[in-house]
Image: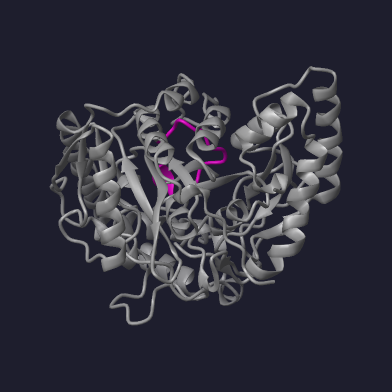
Amino acid sequence: MSSADLTAVELLDAYRSGELSPVEATRDALARIETYDPVVNAFCLVEADDAQTAAKESEARWHRGEPHGLLDGVPTSIKDLLLTNGRPTLRGSLTIDPAGPWDVDAPAVARLREHNAVVIGRTTTPELGWKGVTDSPLTGVTRNPWNPALTAGGSSGGSAAAVALGMGALSLGTDGGGSVRIPAGFTGTTTIKPTYGRVPAYPASPYGTLAHIGPMARSVADTALLLDVLSGFDPRDPWALPTAAPTSAAVGDGRIAGLRIASSATLGYVDVHPEVAAAFEAAVDMFAALGALVTEVDPGFSDPVEAFETLWFSGAAKSIEHLGPEQRAGMDPGLVAAAEQGARASALDYLTAMAVRNDLGRTMGEFHLRHSLLLTPTLPIPAFEAGVEVPAGSARERWTSWTPFTYPFNMTQQPAASVPCGFTRDGLPIGLQIVGPRHADAAVLAAAHAFQATTDWHLQRPRPTV
């Protein structure tokens, strides 16, 4: 087995025992990039020389018995929305000047460095991270590792494809309406959108307090490890929470017997593909078999899509307000159209959407007094054609039409994980979403870990034809 197929936890154990070195792991991750990135287009920048240098430095620390940090020597990638000192962050857009200056690390990136992760490159994003699939005028189309004719999802599609194929064990993603969970669901990988503020952000997103930063990996244990690295207060983020207790220990416990869990196959209003529905019901049965007290019940809210779009498209308008007609002509037309819609929203429209958001948060807060966790499908459909915003035959033109399970929980700022729970007959991954009350990140990950401990969906690996 190549070291590229090992999780971060397994790599660290191998470094500790001397069976493997960070140099070998980085070499194997870069080899995977060389083999598969021409197929899936997960990376917009590969930092091979810097990665190899960092790996040699990590190897020396391990040989001295002096590793430093929780990720010392683990190959890791960064979504190209997060600022990195010394490297351009182009955000999938031709409108950003590569000359910079690029003189600051986002807090999450700084923490990767503090823990000595080996940064191997930057992953692709749709332009300015605005939609649930990954294609942009700058970097083209990112494809699904299980079937390159199909989308990997988005907006963290490059990160999900990279992790799925062993092009680094870990990746940093962002999630404003599902953007770590959507691609995790489509690629059979694992992630969590943490409680808002647990992972600090700088600079602030134009999409405001909808936009989270989250870890992407192949297992819950790795996801929890990376979340522990990323979490903690940063004074540059006015919404940052105090540093939380580590999640890794709670995840290792992984017992859910007696836990009150709600399952909702449709949230009361979603049409779900039959194969997705079947995989979801089998996953719910597994939680019951593990001893959880599972109740089939909808949370009790109607689809908040109009309110979400007012908030999200207003953020899109803010993100391009400084650009003139000539620059906009070369941008993703869907982004420009969404931004124009957002620009037409009044202050009253925005406040009305915020009132919907506040009511949704109250509803879910009361719901979690009765149910510790909520299970839903991550997505109602399997992956569809790459390079388009919506599947063929869609009644609506925006990506929000097929992501009804994800964006509500950006509005409520709750932790929400996605773990693989099966495959369609065509071999496409299906995701299970696990939602908890705000600040219950450890409980969400513990339940996800218990599920993965008794299933093997997360162990399956794609191998696209080269």
Query: Residue, x 71% and y 69% (percent of image)?
Result: 38
Q: Is residue 325 left or right of residue 305?
A: right
Residue 141 percent coordinates (x, y):
59, 71
257 falls in the magenta region: no
| Residue farthest to the bottom, as pictured | 393
Q: Is residue 240 above or below residue 376?
A: above
Residue placed most toward the observer, 459 or 172 = 459
Pinpoint residue 152: horizontal percent, then vertical percent: 51, 64
Q: Position of residue 203 (x, y in %)?
A: 57, 41
Q: Is residue 98 above or below residue 454?
A: below
Residue at image position (48%, 62%) is 153
Can residue 98 be seen?
no
Residue nearer the viewer, 382 or 415: 382
**In the rendered structure, which segment of residues is drawn in magenta?**
196-210
21 vs 379: above or below: above
For the point 56% across and 63% down, the residue is 127
Magenta span: predominant SS is loop
Nearer-the-camera pick, 198 or 317: 198
Instruction: List x then y, in percent, for residue 442.
Output: 40, 28
Find residue 113 and report its image quarter: top right
Q: Residue at the location (65% across, 72% down)?
A: 465
Q: Quadrant of the C terminus?
A: bottom right
Closest to the observer, 122 or 99: 122
Location of residue 66 (image quadrant)? top right
User: Which color scheme does this rendered protein use?
Assistant: one colour
| 203 in the magenta segment | yes
